[in-house]
Image (cartoon, rainbow, N blue to C red):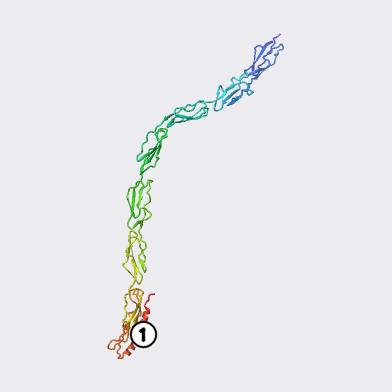
Amino acid sequence: MGSITCGHPGNPPNGLTQGSQFNLNDVAKFQCNPGFRLEGASQSQCLANGQWSSTLPSCRVVNCSDPGHLENSVRQVQPSGPHRFSFGTTVSYQCIHGFYLLGTHVLTCQGDGTWDKKKKKCLLVSCGHPGSPPHSQISGDKHTVGSVVRYSCLGRRTLVGNSTRMCQLDGRWSGSLPHCSVISCGNPGTPSNARVIFNDGLVFSSSIIYQCREGFYSTGVLSRHCTVNGTWTGSSPECTVINCGDPGVPANGLRLGSDFTYNKSVVFQCTPGFMMESDRAAALTCTKDRTWNGTKPVCKAITCRAPQAIPNGKVVGSDFSWGSSVSYACLEGYQLSLPAVLTCEGNGTWSGDIPQCFPVFCGDPGTPAQGRREDRGFTYRSSVSFSCLAPLVLVGSARRFCQSDGTWSGTQPSCIGEGGSSGGSCGIWGLTSLSVPILCSLESRMACQLLQVLLLIPALLQQEIIGMGTKIPQ
């Protein structure tokens, strides 16, 4: 009879079978791989019927319990099996900003269903007190991650190093501890033509202010400050003498003076024939703001006002500029009281005397013998009237007018009567001026007088016509 064998029972999934003989009554043992748990019989015996006493067991993966979350952290799970926390699964923890993990940050699910390590804690990172150097003060009382402290020095000391420090994730403060020291910039000196008007020291944060002396100016900054690197800001200011520049020379004028610096003056004059406008100063002074205290004057041509008008006269000439002359002339029938020539002087006034126009004087026209005269004067436009004593007869102009040329109009009158020259001549006085010569040889004196009258009638009419034709001023 042959031996009975059951054959190899096979290996359970994720496990193995122990044993080398699988004959009657031999026992096969089953074992799961790490991380798996055996479900079913752990061994099986070969029976006489050639069958194993139990079925092949199974190996089920081991699961760990949820390890939970850590406060102030972020959890990340890396599963390796069918379940979230199966054997081989890892759980990592990352503390949030400002916290650090005390211990390892990765847990692994073991084959026995436990985690390989205990869960740790995320602790708040603290850098501790950053320290305070002598002669300084510190602001900021938090020392955890992200906190910032600021340093400043007391008095005139200067901070050397970091003025701020931050608590870092590694629990250390950034930078290094600063220190306070006295920084001096030294004496910057006083520039020429300037003086110091303020100075509060020579150390850091001190200031010095300059002022240019009178008559000088600066185009730069007149203040300097001591900096943290021990130097003064800017450069030493320069004070330059104030100069207002050439104010120029007015047209038709001249300038006296060539010093155009502060507080100096120049004087202007106009050339002959010109005078300054009254609203401009004859002198200019250079001021501290580098400008003249006015503008140069204007020299305008000298002109005199129109000469004074005179009654019954007029001005001859229309040029009233400096050096020009005008004269006067009288209207018809008037004559100047004196020679009249006026000259425009440099001060804008006329030199010379102003004349008057007096009426022309015709003189005394006389009075005929045996006659009378009535008159209103002997000047231009005046008239005189003549008449004869009875029984004399007026021969000539009975009324005469003083004319513009200084002569009397008409003819000189005469009074004639019965008298005559011896020898029987009939002398008719005045008729000779009419070119009517009369000689009378009559014996009878009565007849001669009658003839005289008859001859006088046309002569008198002619004289009257002549008198009427004479221009009589109105």
Classify residue 302 as left or right of residue 33: left
In the rendered image, residue 46, in percent from the top left (x then y), is placed at 69, 12
Label 1 belongs to which residue?
458
Other residues around mark 1 within 10 Å, as few (<14) / some (14–19) / many (≥20): few
Image quarter of residue 94: top right
In the rendered image, residue 353, in percent from the top left (x then y), is placed at 32, 64
Residue 256's place in the image compared with 225, above or below, is: below
- Please indicate, yes or no, whether residue 460 appears anywhere in the rendered image: yes
Classify residue 129 as left or right of residue 268: right
Quarter of the rendering occupied by the C terminus: bottom left
In the rendered picture of this protein, how many numbered marks are placed on residues? 1
- Please indicate, yes or no, whether residue 434 appears anywhere in the rendered image: no
Quarter of the rendering occupied by the N terminus: top right
Q: Residue furthest left?
A: 423
Classify residue 126 as left or right of residue 274: right
In the rendered image, residue 281, in percent from the top left (x then y), is placed at 36, 53
Q: Nearer the viewer, residue 43 or 107?
A: 107
Image quarter of residue 433: bottom left
Residue 203's place in the image compared with 328, above or below, is: above
Residue 86's place in the image compared with 254, above or below, is: above
In the rendered image, residue 462, in percent from the top left (x then y), is placed at 36, 82
Disc 1 secondary structure class:
helix
Q: Residue furthest top?
A: 1
- The type of residue carrying mark 1 is Pro
Image quarter of residue 30: top right
Q: Residue furthest bottom?
A: 443
